[in-house]
Amino acid sequence: MSNDLDALLTALYVHVEDRVFPVLGWSRDHRPGRKPGLSDGELITLAVAQQLLGVASERRWVRFARARLGGLFPYLPGQSGYGKRLRSLGGLLAAVITELARDTPSWHDDLRLLDSTPLPCAASRETVKRSDLAGHAGYGYCASHSRFFWGFRLYLVTTAEGMPIIWGLANPKIGERDAARALLDHDHHLVASGQVILADKGFAGRDFDQFVTSLGAHLIRPDRKDEPTRRGKLARVRQWIEAVFDTLKGQLTLEEHGARTLNGVHARIAARLLALATAIWHNWHTGTQAKRSLIAYDH
């Protein structure tokens, strides 16, 4: 199996249609009326290609895809149809991420990384006032970048090489421990007994620690200044999850999603996480040493 964009897209399409959809019980004939010219498997593959090539604008992407990927996708919808279809499949995109993660060796690892990052959704007061996200998003502060933002926080649980396992969006006014607890409680079936969840000191707290223990896992985090020395700063290991966020923001345009509705935010973030998951999955199966490397697929 070669390691380029066309090979990755072909492998993803075949895997989704032949293995993932049957596991999920997803059928091509699940909707009434005339069958679309672009199947759900093709749409998922097209969305992954968009993110790997770093094209944030859907309008520009449809034009680009007709010229660059016409041989792989004989039919391509317009920008409106593409965006509407993608927003309707947010839940399916999330389910495909999980199935790709199950098909990688690191699924069975005992280490998981947990952290959150800001997800801005507006840059001006006027946009905030007319946004359909009002009531869901909110103002928050990013201490690591010393900035305020309006939007969500993305909570992410990954394997050591960055494969997304559990993720979710929360209003930044919700405390990190409360949001992470709700996320892990909802997807508790994805937390295996004996796993170590590595988080930063923002997740410190007796109640959260006891909650993670009740799931059968172990919470490991850096020591706070007011605590006795136990594990130190864990700076070297903590850089792993920061590198994952750097990949999402730098190569997969996480903060340039441009979504203005709740379904749109969910689908566009899911598409970026799916692109990351697909690259890691493909790199595992092609024997690529750097599992999170996207260099072979960004052109």
Image (cartoon, rainbow, N blue to C red):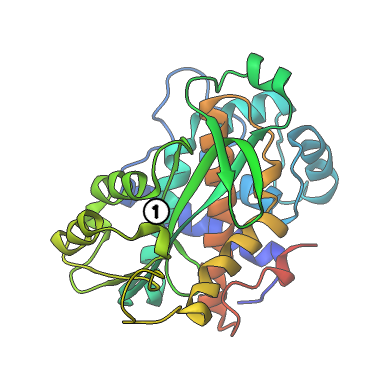
Residue at (25%, 61%) from the top-left corner?
191
Q: In the shown orientation, is residue 55 left or right of residue 157?
A: right
Answer whether residue 43 is visible to the viewer in this image. Answer: no
Q: Which of the two residues, 112 or 135, is positioned nearer the viewer here?
A: 135
Location of residue 139 in the rendering, given as x and y in whole percent from the top left corner: 56, 32
Quadrant of image for the C terminus: bottom right
Q: In the shown orientation, is residue 117 left or right of residue 155?
A: right
Residue at (65%, 66%) from the top-left corner?
7
Location of residue 190 in the rendering, given as x and y in whole percent from the top left corner: 27, 58
Location of residue 114 in the rendering, given as x and y in whole percent from the top left corner: 41, 62
Q: Which of the two residues, 137 or 148, is positioned nearer the viewer here?
A: 148
- Which quadrant of the view contains residue 122? top right
Residue at (32%, 72%) from the top-left corner?
227
- Which quadrant of the view contains residue 258? top right
| Residue type of the residue flagged with mark 1 | Val
Location of residue 13 in the rendering, given as x and y in whole percent from the top left corner: 55, 54
Quadrant of image for the N terminus: bottom right
Total numbered badges shown on the rendered structure:
1
Q: Is residue 166 above or below residue 135?
A: below
Q: Is residue 206 above or below residue 234?
A: above
Q: Which of the two residues, 293 or 240, is positioned nearer the viewer here?
A: 240
Answer whether residue 181 is visible to the viewer in this image. Answer: yes
Q: In the shown orientation, is residue 92 left or right of residue 42?
A: left
Which residue is label 1 attached to? 20
- Which quadrant of the view contains residue 291? bottom right
Secondary structure type for disc 1: helix
Residue neighbourhood size for the residue with mark 1, other residues' Cα within 10 Å, grouped as few (<14), some (14–19), many (≥20): many
Q: Is residue 117 above or below residue 89?
A: below
- For this orientation, the residue located farthest to the top is 130
Q: Which of the two residues, 25 or 148, is positioned nearer the viewer here?
A: 148
- For this orientation, the residue located farthest to the front is 226
Residue at (31%, 51%) from the top-left corner?
23
